[in-house]
Image (spheres, rainbow, N blue to C red):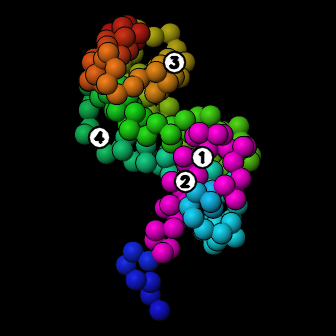
Amino acid sequence: MARKKHSSAEITGPRIRDVALELFARHGYAAVSMRQIAEGVGVQAGTLYLYTADKQTLLFDLMHAHMQELLDALNALPPCSEPLAALEQFTRFHIRFHRAREKAVFIAYMELRNLETANFARIETLRRAYETHLEQLLQRGVATGQFSLPDPKLAAFALIAMLTGVNTWYREGGRLSLERVEEIYWDMVRKAVGA
């Protein structure tokens, strides 16, 4: 018999992921038990295993979903062949996307160390795809003479770290609006690539 719309499975699965995301971000993966996740969801601990094989799988699924969403959103951006305009688009996209997903971003960076080897390799493949997108964009800028960079790969790592860093200090209602932060960061990125 088919499940009814809004069945408990359709609610419980996402709820497990939401609670795990919250707890992993607040306490760290290693400090959170499956029992704590079950309590947060309001189910028996054994019920979790109907939705996930174990805590490692849950962590991997959260990270994989985040990275896949990031790549899908990046690939959905309007095409931009001019390197400087494409770099501005990337800069603003990165800041907005990551600010809207603060907990997922935190877990995606801070909990890499807790992934088992095979899971780590799969997440790293997705991370490399994102980094390569920026690296190739920078290479195009160097090739056209718009950017002056000794090492586009290193510059891509540095720029991603700088842009992701906004999540560590930015707070809504603070001195600067997110739009103003984007403007300032875009100016820094433009100068950093020698444009």
Disc number for residue 23: 1
Mark 1 or mark 4, whichever is nearer to me: 1
Q: Marks 2 and 1: CB-CB under 8 Å? A: yes
Q: Is residue 133 above or below residue 45?
A: above
> Residue 82 or 70: which is nearer the viewer?
70
The residue tagged 2 is 19
The residue tagged 4 is 77
Residue at image coords 47%, 92%: 1
Q: Is residue 45 above or below residue 160?
A: below
Badge 2 density bin: few <14, some 14–19, many ≥20, Cα 10 Å: some
Residue at image coords 52%, 14%: 151
Q: Position of residue 187 (x, y in %)?
A: 31, 12
Mark 3 or mark 1, which is nearer the start of the sequence? 1
Residue at image coords 26%, 38%: 79
Q: Which residues are magenta?
A: 8-36
Label 3, label 2: how many angstroms apart (C-alpha)? 32 Å
Magenta stretch: includes residue 33: yes
Label 1, label 4: how many angstroms apart (C-alpha)? 32 Å
Name the amino acid, label 1.
Leu
